[in-house]
């Protein structure tokens, strides 16, 4: 998401950003999915498997769009000419299309800036009579960071951080002929990988396509090279005899241990268990992990052997199984601890 937001910030007034703001029924992607359509023909992001994109692109090129407009797409038709044919959709999808004017770009620039600081941002956008005036509020923590609203600000906006009454990515009725779209942007989850062996390379390559900030740490400098881990956001050389001297693992980090050295894995795991982490993945069998803990019970948030049980063999397949587990855990936890979808 961050890379897409960065491209929107750098867009020009001839480009358009499209956001799914409401879904009735099923769809390939849900509320909050975004896509950038550039005047040079380039596209970034995805809304569907192609059907929505082609129609939106055609309307943009033929200048049939307002500066801001909500388009409904009925994907429920069963015949070959229907929108939803082979698309995995069977509902009505409402897409907000906005020209990337200075005001729109400024809003997403503010969102991106807050995300880089590790802060969560909620966007409130008022949509009136099918059109979408460029009036919105950005709420971060206990403050409003951008306010283009007209009229009195609803009380639930300022109270949203402490008692979120609305669901992310939904049309909410405010008054007759007026709705509110709410979307929450969250900072990237950090994935800390202990180990920089050859089997970590395909893992980093796969995770780089997801919404994670990737940190690879190791004490072997020869392995921590840009050539091997060009997709990692950060690489850190740590001390073998003092692994956490310069590394601050946060409670909301995802952590994977795969150094292939028993004593080092043992030190790492024991150090991590002092934290309140939600996910620790350990490469190796259950018996090996039990030995790492010297007979102590393995906590429920320690996943060993790491990855989904798909009978994976070799670095590439194991990387796929690990990524599948990361996705499953991340999405499950988000739904469990928030009101958002």
Image: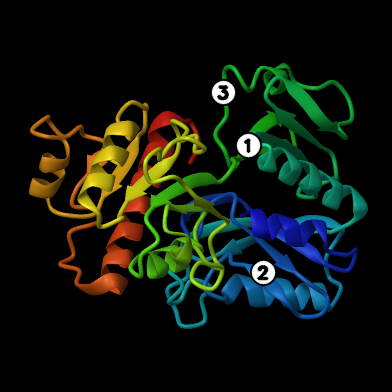
On residue 165, the disc is 3
Q: Is residue 186 left or right of residue 280?
A: right
Q: Secondary structure at mark 1?
A: loop
Q: Which residue is mark 2?
A: 44
Q: Earlier in the sequence, mark 1 or mark 2?
A: 2
Within 10 angstroms of label 2, few (less than 14), some, or many (20 or more) residues?
some
Label 1–label 2 contact, CB within 8 A: no
> Disc 3 on helix, strand or loop?
loop
Residue, disc 1: 118
Q: Residue furthest front?
A: 241
Which label number is shown at residue 173?
none
Q: Position of residue 9 (x, y in %)?
A: 80, 56
Q: Position of residue 106 (x, y in %)?
A: 86, 47
In the rendered image, is residue 54 in sight? yes
Q: Earlier in the sequence, mark 1 or mark 3?
A: 1
Instruction: Please say whether residue 28 is visible from this viewpoint.
Output: no
Marks 1/2: CA–CA distance: 24 Å
At which x and y percent is residue 10? 83, 61
Q: Is residue 94 above or below residue 164?
A: below
Binning the other alpha carbons within 10 Å of mark 1 as few (below 14), some (14 to 19) or many (20 upward) gives: few
The residue sitting at 82% across, 80% down in the picture is 40
Q: Residue at x 36, y 59 (%)?
A: 323
Going by the image, does 19 lie left or right of 215?
right
Which is in the foreground here, disc 1 or disc 3? 1
Residue at the spot x=8%, y=33% of the render? 295
Alpha carbon distance from label 3 to label 2: 32 Å
Residue 308: x and y in percent read 23, 57
Callout 3 touching callout 2 (CB < 8 Å):
no
Q: Secondary structure under badge 2?
A: strand
Separation of residues labelled 1 and 3 (CA atoms): 23 Å
Q: Earlier in the sequence, mark 3 or mark 2?
A: 2
Residue 82 placement, left or right of 284:
right
């Amino acid at each position: 998401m961050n890379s897409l937001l960065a491209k929107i910030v750098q867009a020009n007034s001839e480009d358009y950003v499209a956001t799914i703001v409401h879904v009735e029924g099923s769809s390939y992607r849900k509320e909050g999915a975004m896509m950038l359509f550039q005047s040079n023909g380039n596209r970034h992001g995805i809304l569907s498997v192609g059907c929505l994109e082609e129609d939106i692109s055609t309307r943009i090129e033929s200048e049939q769009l307002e500066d801001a407009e909500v388009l409904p797409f009925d994907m429920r038709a069963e015949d070959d000419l229907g929108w939803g044919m082979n698309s995995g959709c069977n509902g009505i999808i409402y897409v907000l299309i906005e020209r990337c004017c200075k005001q729109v770009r400024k809003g997403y620039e503010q969102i991106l800036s807050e995300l880089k600081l590790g802060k969560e941002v909620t966007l409130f956008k008022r949509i009136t009579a099918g059109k979408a005036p460029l009036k919105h509020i950005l709420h971060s923590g206990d403050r409003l960071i951008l306010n283009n609203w007209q009229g009195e600000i609803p009380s639930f906006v300022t109270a949203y951080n402490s008692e979120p009454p609305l669901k992310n990515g939904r049309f909410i009725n405010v008054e007759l002929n007026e709705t509110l779209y709410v979307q929450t942007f969250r900072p990237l989850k950090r994935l800390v990988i202990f180990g920089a062996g050859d089997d970590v390379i395909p893992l980093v390559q796969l995770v780089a396509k997801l919404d994670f900030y990737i940190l690879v740490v190791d004490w072997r400098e020869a392995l921590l090279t840009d050539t091997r881990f060009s997709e990692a956001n950060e690489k850190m050389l740590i001390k073998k005899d003092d692994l956490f001297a310069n590394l601050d693992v946060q409670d909301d980090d995802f952590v994977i241990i795969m150094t292939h050295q028993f004593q080092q894995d043992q030190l790492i795991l024991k150090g991590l268990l002092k934290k309140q982490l939600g996910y620790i993945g350990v490469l190796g069998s259950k018996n090996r992990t039990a030995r790492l803990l010297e007979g102590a019970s393995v906590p429920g948030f320690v996943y060993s052997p790491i990855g989904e049980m798909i009978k994976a063999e070799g670095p590439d397949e194991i990387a796929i199984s690990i990524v599948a587990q990361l996705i499953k855990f991340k999405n499950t936890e988000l739904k469990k601890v928030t009101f958002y979808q």
